[in-house]
Image: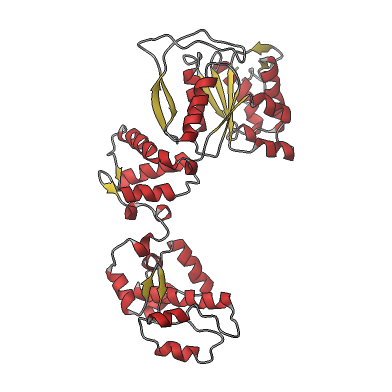
Amino acid sequence: MSSTAAVEVKGTVPSAPFPSRPVAARAESPNAALVHLPSGTSAPIRAVNHLIRQVSAFDSTVLILGESGTGKEVAARAVHDCSPRHDRPFIPVNCGAIPSELLESELFGHEKGAFTGALSARKGRFELAEGGTLFLDEIGDMNPAMQVKLLRVLQERTFERVGSCHSQRCDVRIIAATHRNLEESIAKGTFREDLYYRLNVVPIEMPPLRERGADLPILIKTLSERITASQRHIIRFSPAALAALQQYRWPGNVRELGNLIERLTIQCSGQEVGVDDLPARYRPADWSASHLEPTASEHSLADTGVTLISGISFGETPQLPAAADAEAATSETSASPAPEMADLLFELPAGGMDLRSHLETLERRLITRALEAAEGTVAQAARLLGLRRTTLVEKLRKYGLAATDLAASGS
């Protein structure tokens, strides 16, 4: 999913079948189409939109690059909608989703009887896109044999249906897109260098969402309005929640943001979304320890002798390997250690120490205390420790701890 902003582009000119021929702006019309450009006001997205407007006036082949979910198809549609071909078809094809043995038929069509199951002649995507734009998404996943055939079409502007010996001319603008690094694919021998240079006439690089955090409020508004149009309540984010989302790295880019908005629209219908309403992965790492009001379970944790200090739990002083009487000293330590006692946690014994063993001892004890305070509830213990539940489960397996056994034994 990608977000868009509506921009009105006016005018009409004849189609231009030859590359790199400039065209005039469209004439004003009451039925002028709305062009949806990628949303945002950040410098990276402004540069993308400027390039879209520039290249749309020509029939040059465009190669759109960028991570998955950055809005490559939105950019391709914007190029088509701004171009003189705007009133002709825009035909998308996902080259990575169609089996290689079927892709040739999908692109070029086939004649009746060309292969088993070909009961009638069928037009391919090139014929369907005649006079318009053919968008070849995930071009980097196309197999080498098809790359050769596509290269011929780009060079000759002719193709043949599967099972036919008759060549057909085509007037189609090609826009390709991929999330792969094609130069690396060329080096590995999985993508043809000559096809790369045929496609890479005008490259457009779609920036990842993590590099355009300033666009987040606009994207959220646009996506929320789109969902509201489907008769759901619009949602609002608190400043703290918005700040938390701007810190997130967004590996799924705008598509991931769209999915989150839809999820929160269902869960928080008509309400303001706070940080605690966000799924755990979108909250700041220190949110549980530093921002939430203490709950009954947290008070229970304090009663067991664990004190939260800057998001780190200190209970009993952990055993120091170099100290012969460390275990005895630990048992005599008060529940809430004095500052000088807490400082001992960071003292290096004269004879040195096994740091990994020391940290594991500390971690195991804190997990045990948190589970006791949470009465064996792993999710609650994870919140007290500022961890994800899945992370705590992995640590329980690592140390051979069982939350239910701890709750039952009280140990």
Does residue 319 appear in the picture of this structure? Answer: yes
Q: Find residue 323 and report its horizontal and vertical position in percent.
A: 53, 89
Q: Nearer the viewer, residue 333 or 145?
A: 333
Q: Nearer the viewer, residue 242 or 270?
A: 242
Left or right: 56 as drawn, with respect to 224:
right
Q: Which quadrant holds residue 16?
A: top right
On screen, 98 above or below 307? Answer: above
Q: Find residue 136 and report its horizontal and vertical position in percent.
A: 58, 27
Quarter occupied by the C terminus: bottom left
Residue at x 36% of width, y 75% of height: 307
Q: Find residue 68 and report its horizontal and vertical position in percent.
A: 53, 39
Q: Which quadrant holds residue 380?
A: bottom left
Q: Nearer the viewer, residue 116 or 384?
A: 384
Residue lying farthest to the left in this orientation? 270
Residue at x 44% of width, y 82% of height: 317
Q: Nearer the viewer, residue 112 or 146?
A: 146
Q: Which quadrant holds residue 58?
A: top right
Residue at x 30% of width, y 71% of height: 297
Quarter occupied by the N terminus: top left
Left or right: 270 as drawn, with respect to 107:
left
Left or right: 280 as drawn, with respect to 295:
right
Q: Find residue 90 and report its horizontal and vertical position in percent.
A: 51, 21
On screen, 79 above or below 381? Answer: above
On screen, 134 above or below 263? Answer: above
Does residue 371 appear in the picture of this structure? Answer: no
Residue at x 50% of width, y 46% of height: 251
